[in-house]
Amino acid sequence: MIAPMGRRGAEARKGACRARQSVGIVDLATLRAEPQAWDDCVARAVEPHPHFSRHVIEAHRQAGLLRDDCAFVIVRTGERLDAILPFRSGLDITGLGTAVAQPVLSPFMPSSAPLVAGDAFADTLATLVAGLAEASGGRAWRWPLLSISGRAGQGLLAAMHEAGWTTGIVETFERPVLDRRPSHDAFLTDHPHMSRLKDLRRRRRRLAEAGTLERVTATEGEALASALEDFLALEAAGWKGEAGTALACRPKTLALAHALFAGTAGPVTVRADTLSLDGRPLAVSLALIAGGTACLLKTAYDERERALAPGLVLEAEIVRAFHETAFAERLDSATRAGSALESLYRERETIAEIIAMPPGGEARLSIGRRVALARFEHRAKAEAKRLLKRG
């Protein structure tokens, strides 16, 4: 246990449900001692996602990417967990030398919405927001990759505003998602990018002219382990390997990949789809599934076949399987802005980075100034990336 959280703010909360709830800060070791309660919170969340689940957090711990003293804000009713958010505090440009709080994120955590159970949803969020102020010591939160079009993100912002927080949006982008239709034909009907779909069918035919082209799915055992190794090899053989950013290039990210896709735990399942030609892998997609949403976290492809876009051909095949086998209700591309999946997936989810300040917090910098500093940082990083690429 890091420290029990004081009940400041809790005594002022109204309603019988809120009175039964408590908010606290615990470390990972403490939360790991409640595996059933943790899994239950994921399963009951209004927007369940795998990123703060026991399976994903434990994989990060095993890989050495999270310490046992990693902190979590939790809301509970008795023995039941109603909300979970891992966070960290550290110096940030938006604090000009002072600490700010942020949700824990990694390349395998493309979303930062807290897990919030649907039971007494508004009351739980109000309790959670009080805990966020305690967790940051009254300082600001910098919150990237928050879905503000979903119930959890919208509810969080509403609860902050009701509690007197001030917030500002640094940037937003539209992430491609896809809700399952009754059939694949229904998905194709009136698709806004029919020319793109036609092009992918043409590329698939070209690939198939060279041999037997097939998509295979693995969810466990040796087949899953083999698919993961194929993914790692394809990624390392491409530009990410040359840049040193492929998962296999670093011991900790390699260990994370193996821990994430070694099997399943609780309400999270794993999936690997492979597109192969005469048994040779052309592309591999890795996904985590929770609460009916499949998050397609990583795709690697044979860059020698770049002209025929095997990665996108595989994505189109996954969409077909999604409708034909109903392995999920929604596909989440888990991408940043400018994804190639924008021409394939039909829905969009608004992802934002926000700055949030609790009432009575540090007033040395306004929200507007903090937002401007965050935007400056983004521009500086983009320019540095452009110059490195040109060099």
Image: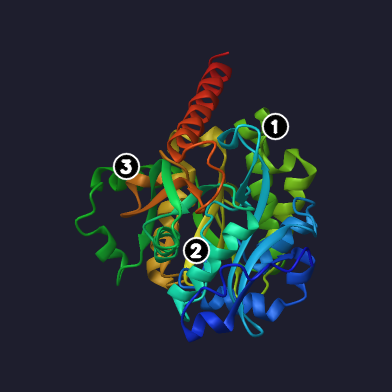
Q: Quadrant of the C terminus?
A: top right
Residue at 63 percent of width and 53 percent of height: 136
**Which of 85 and 248 lies nearest the eye of the viewer?**
85
Q: Mark 1 points at which residue?
A: 244
Q: What residue type is labelled 1?
A: Gly
N-term mark: 3 or 2? 3
Q: What residue type is labelled 3?
A: Asp
Q: In which quarter of the image is residue 224?
A: bottom right
Q: In which quarter of the image is residue 122?
A: bottom left
Q: In this view, does 13 lie to the left or right of 252?
A: left
How far from the left and from the top, in percent, is residue 145? 49, 49
Residue at 59 percent of width and 48 percent of height: 139
Is residue 68 visible from the viewing direction of this image?
Answer: yes
N-term mark: 1 or 3? 3
**Which of 77 and 377 lies nearest the eye of the viewer?**
77
N-term mark: 1 or 2? 1
Measure how far apart labels 3 and 2 are at the Cα level: 25 Å
Q: Mark 1 against mark 3, which lies toward the viewer? A: 1
Measure how far apart labels 1 and 3 are at the Cα level: 32 Å
Q: Mark 2 points at which residue?
A: 294
Q: Are marks 1 and 3 in contact (CB under 8 Å)?
A: no
